[in-house]
Amino acid sequence: MTPTNLKAIIPITLGTAIEWAEYTFFAYMVDLLSKQFFPIDDPEIAQLKTYGVFATSYFMRPLGALLFGLIGDKIGRKPALMGSMLLMCFATTTIGFLPTHTHWESLIAILLTICRLLQGLAVAGEFHGAAIFILEHRQSRPFFTGCLTPFAASVGMSIGAFAAMLVSLPNAPDFAWRIPFLASGFLGLVALYLRRNVSETPVFQQTITQKNTDSSNYQENSPAWASTAAMALFISVFIYVGNIYYKTLTIKIGGMNTQTAAQIITFGQVLAAFLIFNFGARADYLNGKKMCLMGLGTAIFLGPVMVACARSGNILYSMVGQIFYAIINGMVSATFMTLLVKQFRPTIRYTGNSLAWSIPSAIFGGTALMVADTLTNRFGFIGPGLYISLASLVAFLTILNPFSILSKLKFSYRSLPPFPEESLKGNPEN
């Protein structure tokens, strides 16, 4: 990488890691936060209420995708990323200062929900926006470049899982849950400061000069919507059930203690981050699309196996389940961003990618924990496992032939423009 590329990539990936840590603290701390913000007379009801607050953030993601997408396509990629980072810092820091349910119970629940809504609004502008920014800055080795955003997000989730593990320790003080929210808010401001010196992408600057001659529209990018939505469905279900809800399964069915369960899912997420980076480094030399399909195909069959490992109550078996999770996550997350981002034309790339991703995420990601819990209560451990398999099958068939249902439009994968000015095979040099 050239110094110019590094100057653009490091602040963006650092900000993405921090923003996803901020966003996922809540998910990993559901058990603990349910006791802080809701009366614990009935722990099951308190947990369901916390799941509900968690879900509300996802319903804001389509709105956030539209808001920051329009900013990213009309004003610039950089202003959109700056705005999403600032909003996330504000919402996360505010959660850290909220009183617990012992003070003004209803008001605190409303304020917590508002903060989660703002977090959902912010993260919708970050994930694909960061990937677009990096891919438009660095044209060589597109799969490796494209894996950096999922890698950063996975690192952020690892930080969230690790923080949740620390604050759940028996000797942790009562206020310990506040520390990750407050600390990440400060780190987010540091990342925001670093981002201010990053230059706008060359691709966006070129679209400004060509906007009067570019006739691309949303209908023209219809095939891209199908593949992006299917992948969003898979990622939403796979990550939240395969890692975050995995902790609940090891406790609820496997009988494992909270600290051990937290350590196991932290291990799984750290391993996933490591494998995303390594698979991404190799995807430009291999066939990135086949690697993605291999990961999706593996998930179809191993989804129930992963969940079965969680119910075993055995530490070794539970870790094996997270190894399966990490390998599948690594193969898919290392490749999907480059495959998806390229399909949208530059003039609507930010809005198209973010919106096509956020709508399925709102439906399936926001409800993943509640659906998994309902399936577990009704069908046992096999329910969440089959849910993963079904989501994997939908994504596999769509990515395998994403335009079959739109064949009448006479679009083909090869007819779409290379990203940017290069084929997906990339250039292993540089």
Image (spheres, helix red, strand yellow):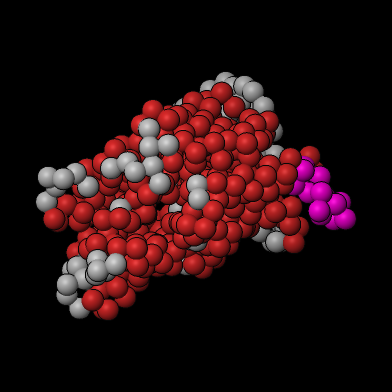
What residue sits 49% from the left and 41% below the top? 307
Question: In this picture, is 51 found above or below 238?
Answer: below
Q: Nearer the viewer, residue 7 or 345?
A: 345
Q: Position of residue 259 (x, y in %)?
A: 26, 41
Drawn side of residue 194 relative to residue 381, left or right: left
Q: Is residue 184 visible?
A: yes
Question: In this picture, is 200 found above or below 41?
Answer: above
Q: Nearer the viewer, residue 96 or 260?
A: 260
Q: Position of residue 84 (x, y in %)?
A: 40, 58
Does the magenta segment cover residue 352? Answer: no
Drawn side of residue 245 relative to residue 300, left or right: left
Question: In this picture, is 418 found above or below 94?
Answer: above
Q: Position of residue 374 (x, y in %)?
A: 49, 59
Q: Which residues are magenta?
A: 401-413
Q: Nearer the viewer, residue 323 or 310?
A: 310
Q: Nearer the viewer, residue 195 or 247?
A: 247
